[in-house]
Each structure stands twice: as C-alpha cells, then as structure tokens.
Amino acid sequence: MPGKLKAKIVAGRHLPVMDRASDLTDAFVEVKFGNTTFKTDVYPKSLNPQWNSEWFKFEVDDEDLQDEPLQITVLDHDTYSANDAIGKVYIDIDPLLCTEAASVISGWFPIYDTIHGIRGEINVLVKVELFNDLNRFRQSSCGVKFFCTTSIPRGYRAAMVHGFVEELVVNEDPEYQWIDRIRTPRASNEARQRLISLMSGELQRKIGLKVLEMGGNAVVGYLQCFDLEGESGLVVRAIGTACTLDKISSGSFSNTHTHPNTAPPSNACNSPSKDGKESPLAHGCRSTHNSPVHSACSSQRLSQNFSVSVPTLIFTGMGSGGSAGKEAGPLKTLLRQQTQTALEQREFPFFTLTSFPPAFLVHVGGVVSARSVKLLDRIHNPDEPETRDAWWEEIRQEIKSHAKALGCHAVIGYSENTSICEEVCILSASGTAAILNPRYMREGCLDMGSTDHRFDDPSPPSCGFCHIPYDELNMPFPAQLTYCYNCRRQKVPDVLFTTIDLPTEAAVTGKGCLIQARLCRLKKRAQGEVNATAISNLLPFMEYELHTQLMNKLKLRSMNALFGLHIQISVGENMLLGLASATGVYLTALPAPGGIQVAGKTPSELNEQHVLTIQKRINDTIAKNKELYQITPPELTEEGVGSPIPEPRHRSRLFRSHSESSDEVSELDLSHGKKDAFVLEIDDTDAVEDIHSLLTDASPPTGFYSCNTETMPGIYNWTTAVQMFTSVRVLRLSNANLSNQSLNKIFTDLCENLLKSFYFKLRSMIPCCLCHLNFNVAVPEEELIQVSVTAVAMTFDKDQAQERPAERFITKGGSETEDQLQFSLELCADTSSTNSQTSSKISGVQENALVSSRAASVDYGSFADRCSTWLELLRLKAHTIRRGSVKTISSLEHCSPLTEGRSRSLRSSRSFGGSSVTMVKMTPLSFLPGTRIIKYLGIINMFFIRETTSLREEGGVSGFLHSFIAEVFAMVRAHVAALGGNAVVSYSMKDCVLMENPNKNQAQCLINVSGDAVVCVRETDPEPVAQMVNSGQTCAADGTS
Amino acid sequence: MSVELDVFVGNTTIMDEEVYQLWLDGYTVNDAVKARVDAGVLDECEATEDVLLSDTMDQYRTFQMCERLLQSPAKLANQLLFQITPHRQAMLIERYYAFDDPFVREVLGKKLSKGTKKDLDDISAKTGVTLKSCRRQFDNFKRVFKVVEELKGPLVENIRQHFLLSDKLARDYAAIVFFANNRFETGKKKLQYLTFQDFAFCAGQLINNWTVGAVDNMVEDMDVDLDKEFLQELKELKILITDKDLLDQHKSLVCTALRGKTKALPEMEANFKNLSRGLVNIATKLTNTKDVRDFFIDLVEKFIEPCRSDRWTSADLKLYLTHYTNSAHILDTFKHQAVWDRYMGVIKSCIFKMYHD
C-alpha cells in the first residue's frame, strides 16, 4: 500500500436552497476515491453547513493516486425521495505526490454542477502520506514534475534535456454510448468529465514513466489535447520535452533570471566560486550554475567533463563550468559532431520548448510543418491505439525530414493539433528547424558586455541564430542571401519565419506587432474518401496563400522576421478556415525588407492610374508603419554592406512547383523579386481584393501594441498590471451563397473587430501590450464561424519604452550608478580586466560557427526528390514551409532587459505599497511582471462540461458561455489557491467546444484549460531580476575561467 | 450574417464605472450605447459603435450576474466567481445602494409594501427616474429594512456592517428605515420644499435622542421605534401652556433675554403663546401613532410657517429657540427639565434644519 490519501470536509457556504418549504438545505457530502466512498453526517437546515468531519482515509496504490481524482459530491438529504445532488468537486491530487510542490490542499472550492454551474463552495483539506521511499516511485511515475511552461521554469536549471516524449490514450466517448439514451444529461456529463480526468491522469503517468526511463525528472512544455472524435471515440494525447531539472538553491534563486549581462560575465570568469552563496557579489549568482558537483550528481549521464554525453542532448553544460573552457578547438568540433549524430539518431529530435537558455540555439532554419487528412473510424481496441499512434508517427517523420532538408538536426517550438469535422480529421504538426549547441555555455559568456563593439564581434549572439544552417549553394528554397547585417561574417536570409519566441539576445530594431493571415475556402459538401481528398487538395493552396499574406503584411510593416508563427486550419462541412498568427519584428541582422511594388498586367490608361493610387497607398502605409513601430535601422557602415551574395541561379528548383497550379498563387512569384522589390501584379479582381484586405488591416490605436509571443520586442519595462482574458465570438453566415472573397472579408472583419474590441475594453491600461494573443478558429456547425482568443494585457512604463535598444545600454549605465553604485563599480572593474580574455574566446566561437554551418548541410538530394514529386506530396497531405536561417547564439543585448528589470522592480516595490489582496493572477505567459516565481505547485489541467436546458433564461448563448467561462476561471483560481498558490502561469484554454440548439432552448459547452500553479512574490528585492526576459533561462554566462 | 455569440471575460472582472452607472440608472443596452456615444467614448479609442455595443452587452451581462451578490454584499467579498479588488467591490456596493433624491422623497415615510411597489411607475413618471432604477432603489430600501428590523444594536452600525456601506450612506438608509417604520408623513404639499437630506438629518436627531436605543443600546428595534416611556413623559410638558402663570413667566423671561438682540422682537412677543402652544402640543400628542406620523407637518404648520410669515431670519429663530429652551429651566414650578431638554434638543435642531430662509 504505497500511499494513504486523507480528506476532511470542513464546511460549506452559499449553498443553494434545496428545500423550497424551509428555504434551507440539509446537506451532506460523499467523498470518493477509486471505489471507496465515505459520507459525512447530514448538517440539517443550513446554507452554511459546518461538517467538520473526521479524516477520511483511503489506502491506495500510487498508480491510482496518479490516475484518479478525488471526487467530492455535495447532496441534499431527502427523507422520502432520492437525495438530490447539489454539485461536485474533482480534486487532482497529483501536486501532492511531488515533494517539491504542494504539501496540502486546503481551501474553498466551488461546488460545480454541469447543469446549474457553481452552487456554493465547500472547504476541504486533502493530504497524502506516501509510505515508500523515493525509489519506489519509479514503478509509477510519482515525482515527475510537469510544466506547461515552454521554457526552463524559473528557479530551475536544466541539467539535461532528454527530448521528446509523447503518448496517447483512447476510449469510447460516454456521450456516444448506448446508455446515454437512457441516462440524464447530468449523469452523462459527469461520466465524461470523470473519464477525461482519468484519461489525463493515466496519460500523465505514462508520460512520466517514459521520462523516468530516459533518466529525466520533469516534463517541460507539456501540451495535452483532447480529440472528440464523436462516434469513433475520445483521444487524449500529450507531448512534451523531458528534462532533468535541478532546483536552484533559494539563496541564489533571484539571480537565475538575471540576464547574463546583469552580472558582469567577467565576474563569473574571474571568480569561479563553486557555490552561489560564496559569491563575493550580491548578484554574482552565476556561480551557482558553475557548481559542477551539483549537476554532476544530479544526472548520471552528465560526464564530468561537461558535456556532450550521448545520446541525450546536454543543455546544461553549465554543469561543469570550470572544465569547459579548457577544451581545445578540434575537440569541440568533434563534440559537436557527436551531438549532432546523437540528435539524428533519436527518433524525434523535437522540443516543445519555445525559448532556450542563451547560446543553446545555434541556428534557425525555418518553419517546418506537416498536415495529414484522415478518415476516422471506430477505435476497436482502446488498449492498442495503434492507428492514432501511426498517424502521428507518420507526421512526425515528415517533420523530421523537412528539418533535415533545412540542414537542421532538431525541431524546436514543436506543437501538434487536430481539427475534426464529422469523420474527417486534419492532423497538423509544426515547429522550427534548428541547430542546437550543447556547448553554448562557454561561448555564451564570451560575448557578454560586448555590446559596444558588436560590429567587430565575429559572432555576436544577437544575430547568430539568423545565420543560415543550410548550404548556400544548395538551398532548400529560393531565398535572398546577404551577409549578416550585424556581424558581416555569415549569411542570412532576407526573411525568417519561426514558431519560437524571440531569443532574448536577438538584436531587434523597433517594436514588433501581431501579424495575421486569414483565409476562408469553400469546399463542396462530400462524404468519406471524396471529402478527405477534396480537403487534402485544398490544404497546400491554403498554406501557400496564408504564407503569401503573411509575407505581404510583413513587408507592409517593414519587418523581416516572424516569431511564434502558428497556423491553424479548421475544417467545416462546407469550408476550410485558415488562420496564421505571428509576431513580426525587424531583426537587425537581416536585410531591410524591400517595398511592395504594384504592377498592372494590362496596360490601359485607367488601370495605370489605379495602379499608381494603390502603389501610393502602399508606400504611405509602409512609411506610416515604420514610424509606428519605430523601425529605424541603424545606418549601415559602408564596408561590406549591401553586398548581396551573387544569386545562385539554381536555387529555385524546389518547392515552387506547387504554386504553378494555382492562378492566385502565381500572381506573387516570390522567386522573381528583386532584392528590394516585391511585386504584386493586379490582373484580376481577386488581386485587387487581396490588396484591399492587405491595406484594411488596422494598426492598433495609439498606446497599444500586440504580439502573440511571450513579450513584445522593444518593450521591457512592464508594470505589475496584468489582465488575462478570454473572448469568444461566433458568427452566423446567413447567406448561403457566399463567394470565397466575401467569406474572406467576413472572416477578416471578425478577427479585426475582435482586436478592436480588446483595444477598446482595455483602454484604461494604456500604455499597454496584448501579449500571447492566441486565436483559435473553429467551424462548430455549418454556417457558423467561431473564434476564441486568450491573451494577457500588460501595461508598461511609457517613457522608457520609447528608448531605442542602442540607447538603452547607456541609460542603464546611468541609472545603475544612481541605483546601485556599488555594483556598477565592481562591474566596471571586472569588465576591463577580462576584456582580452573575452575577445579571444569570441574568435573561437566564430570558427565553430563556420564549421557547424558547413557540417549541417545534409542530404538535400532526398529532399529534392520528395519535392519534385509534389503531387505525390499533396496526396501525402504534408507540406513544408520555407524560410530560414542560422547561427551561433550567445548574448548581446543583454544590457537592455537589465534596465527594465531594475526599473520594474523599483517601480513595483513602490506601486505595491500595502495592498494585501489575496487574488489569483492568471497569465498565458511563463512569468508575471514585477514578481518572481518562488515555487511551482504543479500542473493545472481541468476539463469541464456545462449544459443548459434553459438557454433563454440564462441570457442566451452569450449569457450561458459568459457565466461558464467565469466559472472555469473561478474553479482554476480556487484550485490554485487551495494548493497555496497565488498565480497561474502558462495558462491556456485548449478547447472551447460549444454546441447550441436555440430552438430547443439548449446548449452544451466543453472547456479544457491548463497551466502551472505557482507561488510568486513581489519583486521587492532591489536586485534586478529580469524576469520577463526569457523565462527560466539560466544564464549560461558563467562557465568560463 | 449575424453575431451569434459574443463574450469577453477577464480574470479580473472588467467593469466600467460609467457603464455601471448607466445600468443602475436603468438604461437599456441601446440607450446606454447612445449615451456613451454622446459622452464621446468613441473618440477615446478609435472605436466603432459595434465595438461599443459589444462592450456594453458584456458589461450588462456581468452586472446582471453580479446583482445577486450585490443584494447581499457580504457575499461579494468571499464569492469566487468574480475576481474583483476590494476597493472596486466597495464602489460597486456603494453605487448599487445609492439612490436618487427625487425618488426617495417620494417613497420616504411610505410603507415599503407591495402596494407602494405598484405605484412605482407613477413615481417613475413623476421623477423621471426609470422604472427599473426605481425598482432597484425600492428593493434596496425594503431589503435593508427587512434585515435590520430583526437586529439588535445601533441601526446605523448594523446597516454599515451588513451592507458594507459608507457611513454617510448607512445614515441615509437608517433615516429611510426609520421613516418607513414610523410612517412619517413627508408627501404633503407643505413639506415639498424639504429635501431628503433635511429629513435624514431630522431622522438622525430622532434616532439619537428619542428612541429606546438612545438610552438602552441592547434592545431589539431599539433605534427604529420611539421610546414609549419618553413619549408618555412628554405629556407632563403640558403644564407649560396650561398653567397661565408659567406661560406668562416663560414669555417674560424669553423676551427679557431677547431684548436688544433682534429686530423681530415684537413679532416674537406677539406670537410667543401661539408658538409655545404649538410646540408643547406636538409633544403631548406624540403618544398617538397618527400624530407621530404628522410630526413634520405639525412642526411646519405650528411653528415654521408662522415664523416665516413674520420673516424671521435663521439667526432670529436660533436665538428664540435657544432662549425659549433655556428659560424653562429658570421656571421654579417647572419640574420636567430632563424631558424638556430631550424634547427641545431635537426640536431645535430639526427646526433649524427645516427652516429655509
């Protein structure tokens, strides 16, 4: 008996009146775990019962502890008839199984009923006593920590990143079982909620086992999804990145997030103290990472000599800072090759992480994605979900090969999703092809503080990742290559698309903005095979068109890179919806985007005029946007600039092929474009429409910025004000005969209007940025388009936001002398003393980078083959997306976040004053500005169903969904508070499935949310804690010496 | 093409104070949108009317969901559904319980019954306050009345604690409850010139001095009902007007004291007996519930109107009443000093408040 679960029911409050005669309730509680049930006494005639029960004890297997939720049912006692259920509370006890997380669950939980919503609250205490020692955990997977956060959680450091873990479980959906015809909707909903809770418990346990097998102790970037396949069943699947995480001792904790530049790198180099506590500087934190002893013992695979043990990718070379520096050049190369092979040997070198410790990411190739259309059939044997596994396996292979084609050995920012309509299912996966560097640690520290001479620096981290990973003479797709505008050593593409967050150290000019491409495509109604084929035939065109739109919009904003790209294609009975969201930025390292040139095909007088007008409008918009986003690229020095690489003629052989099959597509021949001219030809009305839609995208009102990444490039000085929100809008298309064009317009307007609504509602927060705008589209029924959005609005300090990156460093110096004279003095001293050392290492890096980009050129041959048979690919329903580039990463702009970190902390300590509100903050980001996370309490993963048979009385669908979403928030907050937390980070609403039947006065909705429950404290510490900068990135800075 | 569903839910509940006020004032969504357009909200954020409509609907829904909680404000603080900061909660409650002076003047002193509720549409038409808002205000009065009716302890404090209202608003509610309980007549034409605040002040005086609670503070209904014993004792004051000697003596004492201090002395002298009879008669009749109801109208008719027709200034009035009260102490045969002070103290301040120059 490995565990004893104890629960105590304390009291209830605000219970509903169950007895009309007395206006009171005779409540009692059933506590159920597995097959054991306990009951409390009836507390008669009260709406605020005080049960104060004994401790109910369940003796259970740890396997059950992981799978089962604790189920609490509140009932009204009735002498003569059956007891009426008031509602239920499901408590996931997983967080109690982790020693580092919560130790007790105690608090008020909303009593939830799937028909009536929240009906009062109940106060519950839950504890777990585990009898066994830690080793026994290995049989189940208790103790493996789960994080939704897609970066290394704050307060931890990754001793090792083991890689991709995935699992899926299937079951019959209770809603579609025969019994559902005779049972009440409530019973059916509860059966479903319970089943999904069990399935996610099981899934988590199974993933945990895989992690333990790999030698890890945590899953980061855990992404769990439900596929409601209807008749054919219910699939719960999850992916994540297995890691070995070490908790950073609390003493040095606050420093973990410190941007490398905060503490002089030299400090780390000069004073290689093995323990943070011994560090001479108050924020000489780095040293913690240095302690080789610590990480060495924590992970068996970490060979003492830093690194690259196989087959796991080591990510924390930090483990052995001391030895790293001693490695000789050739050895490095060898190690690199080893790692690469190691990576390639792995089944799927995928990472669900979107942001990485500095220097981990070497080069970024570009976005890779694959889609596949499948026909669902009943899952015959739920224990052997082979078909679904095989489907995903196929897609992942595809992704892997795409990455290879881009000269990359890994895929980062990886995610998977599905869209189901009747029996057709589109499976999608996407990520960013990349080259990762296990030896980043040493290199990372080299560039520290070298901002001033970034142009002399051979391989500054601010541009390294942009450098192409593939062979320039054998490019996977046509791209304009130039020498990096930052370092001038390596080549970069003209445009870069990625699915990851903007690396902290990237050099960016101006601000970023949300860029969306929206597309509707009608399709014929069809069944089975025919339908699936029709959809798969449409997919590549949609994908292409979305990309064209993105590209146009990017140019229109005078930007050259997209981060956080997420493309969703949703299928309905008679249409397909495509929505691509990303955050556009101007990467300093990449060439300035050329303008857009409009050309008329038919040279008529009238047309000419028209073309001119449009051209003018486009030019004006570009100029306006440049100002708006403060895109003023640094004046380029004459040397070496603008010497584009002679265009390799043979490059356009790939991938374009499919474009020819679409007339719309051919209007925009990307490979034609001159360096500075992006030609739009107007030859039919479609194109005119396209241009119009291009220009109608409104920019956010003054004082607002928006992005779908963790934070906005160019804004760092956040205040503590955050407002997370969820918004859902459903549009009914009443007109049956819509054309693609008008449908596009409707869809575009829907998205634009949503954004406008947000700006308006949040106007009191100006200056403000909407971060992590996550749009989700669905076609719940014929004629309906549903868009749901979750995002967070954060205010920032206006004055400093205006500063350009280049100036920030100076400002920072100034403020530092004022704020923390002591530190800055030390900083100066250290910097000067280690300058020489620094530069020498830089050169080392450079060599390596070159080597790596060469070494990375993989077999394009096979890829070319694949692509030449594009039609075949169509049938394979998979598709790779172009755009990429490369290089070594380290750190350059480290200075900037520091300033903000400091100013923020000062500010926050002021603004917080004496407020003592016990509130639970929620955010889709991995951090809360102005605070630091001191503890992760466990994952929150909740699934709710709400149904009503009195839709009108509840205020129609809007009223119904409004209260349901509010209830979901309330339940999440209550669970977090009961775990002892005060915030949820990396919150997301994965599903919001709404079905309505207004004629019958009915509606049903399913919502799935997840996030990480945390305890965070105000950042009253005057030390700069650059939290918003790349969550949880441990500073690689140290290692050297 | 139509918007089938449109919701926006914030983790911290978003509430615009202006929209809240419009909702409280009983505006329909469309009227509220118009009002907001007129107020120039659109210029603030480059919004369109659609945006405004969607926002207004969202907020109205939120307020409707909150209404249940606002009706028992203590719940608002420990409910879990809406995350609202404490100072915002206080704002919501305070505004929800705020009322319109024209409306309350109509209802003041009336029985808070279904009958009165039926008359609300007339009141709405008369005051220009929307029916919806009238209902809310009326229900608030009734709810507060019901709750405090059964509680021991000081009225104002009870209201403040149960409804989490500010001191000022709690005092106003105490006045409303007190008036409703004693059914004071306030609607007569002669009383129309008095504002709610005049009455609220008087109610405060009565509650603090004439109720049971003024002497014993742990009795039920202590602050709502007048002290019966005291009312009985007031009968003793009759001697001041029935005993001819005493009346003359009182008059001469007052007139002597006033000599040279006011221009209105002749009128005061001439009216003394009338005025004194008026005030003492009010006192002696207060044992009748009917006469309690007419307390304010009596004060106006028997005292304020005669003074006003003689064009007394407020200062005159103050002077007169002060000396009138104090002189009674010097009357050697007058034994009821304590009752007299308790009576006149309230009468004096009520008349000051009710006497508009």
Image (spheres, grey):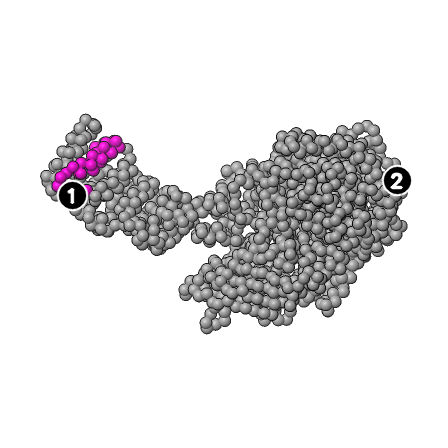
Q: Residue furthest front?
A: A278
Main secondary-structure element of the magenta-colored stretch: helix
**Quarter placement of the C terminus of chain B:** top left
Q: Tell me: A499 left or right of B127.
A: right
SS category of the residue bearing label 2: loop
Foreground residue among B298 and A282: A282
Label 2, on which residue?
A648
Q: Would residue B326 be counted in the magenta stretch?
A: yes
**Which chain does the numbered disc 1 sit on?**
B
Residue B59 shows in the view: no
> Where does label 1 land, which residue?
B335
Q: Is residue A61 visible?
A: yes
**Does dot 1 land on a helix, a strand or a loop?**
loop
Query: What range is drawn magenta here?
Result: B310-337
The amino acid type found where label 2 is placed reads Pro
Quarter where residue B355 is shown: top left
Spatial distance from mark 1 to mark 2, Cα to Cα? 120 Å
